[in-house]
Image (tube, helix red, strand yellow):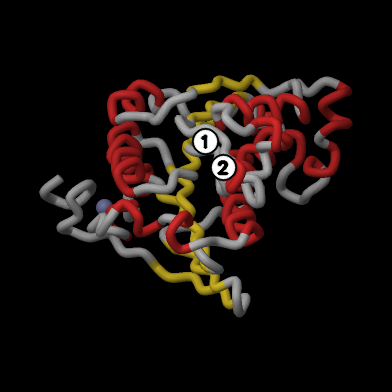
Amino acid sequence: MLTDDELLRYSRQILVPGFDIAGQEKLQRARVLVLGLGGLGSPAALYLGGAGVGQLLLADGDVVEVDNLPRQLCHRQSDCGRNKAESAAEAIAGRNPGVRIEVIPRHLQATDLDQLLPGLDLVLDCSDNYPVRYALNRASRRHRVPVVSAAAVRTEAQIALLDPNREGPCYRCLYPDAGSDTALSCAESGVLGPVVGVAGSLQALEAIKYLSGCADPLGDTLLVMDLASLAFQRLRIRRRDNCPDCGSRA
Ligand SMILES: [Zn+2]
C-alpha cells in the first residue's frame, strides 16, 4: 500500500499508461545493485532513487576527482577525495529519504558478487573495465540476475539488457575478448558529459521498464548510439555456442 505522501511524490510516473500504482509497488519491492557511481552510475542511480526503487546497493571503490565533475552528476566539488558510493548515497538520500541505500565503498571481486547477487532483482553495470564486466557476467549467469549494461566513450554510447532467465546472449557473447583494460577508457579516449548521461539515463529507463512492467525492455538487442550524428541503431545480439561464459563448453 502506498501512503498519501508516496502517491503525491510518484504521481507523475503513476499517471504513465501501463505504470500505475502496481508499477510503483513493484519498484518499491525491488533490490537493485548499481556497480560504479561515475558517469553512467550517477544519472542511473539518481533516477532509480528518485523513482522509488525500494533498495539500492551502491558499489564503487574510487574517490571523486575534479576531472569527474563535468559528467558525474552525483558528486560536488566538496566531495573530491571522498568515496563515490558514499557521495552518491548522500545525493540520492537528499532527494528521496524513502529509499534504503547500502553503500559498498570498494571494488567488487568475484566472491563479493557471488554474495551480493542472490536476492537482487537487477544489476546496472556502470563500471568501466572488462575484468569487472566479465566477473559480473559470470555471476549474473550463475545467480540468474539480469544486467543492464552500458558504455560510453567520445560521442558514442551503447546499452543492452542481458537476461539469463530468457536464455538469451550474455555480455561475453557480445564481447568475447577483453582486448585491453583501456578499451573502454574515457580517460584515454575522452567523452562528452551528455553522452555518458544519455547512456546512464537509458539504463535507469530500462531498469524501470523491466521492474515495473510498464513497457517492454530491450530484448537481445544492442542499442548503438552515434551521438555526434544522433544516429541510433538496434543490432540483434546472438548467443555464441563457443561463448566461454554461457556456451556449451561453459
Ligand atoms: Zn555468452
Mark 1–mark 2 CB contact (< 8 Å): yes
Q: Quadrant of the N terminus?
A: top right
**Badge 1 amino acid:** Val
Q: In this image, 239 relative to 151: left or right?
A: left
Q: Residue at x 59, y 46 (%)?
A: 68
Is residue 218 in view from this perspective?
A: yes
Task: Count residues near mark 1 (Cα–Cα under 10 Å), then give few for <14, some for 14-19, many for 20+.
Answer: many
Residue 49 spot, x, y in % from top left:
68, 33
Q: Is mark 2 within 8 Å of ligand 1?
A: no
Relative vertical location of residue 134 with respect to residue 118 in this rendering, above or below = below
- Badge number at residue 41: 2
Residue 250 picture location, percent across and down:
15, 45
Residue under label 1, please give it: 34
Q: Residue at x 57, y 36 (%)?
A: 64
Whichever of labels 1 and 2 marks the residue nearer the N terminus, that label is: 1
The image's mark for residue 103 is: none
Give the alpha-carbon distance from disc 1 to disc 2, as whole Å: 7 Å
Relative height, residue 15 to residue 174 (above, below): above
| Location of residue 181 in the rendering, given as x and y in whole percent from the top left corner | 31, 51
* Residue 208 can be seen in this image: no
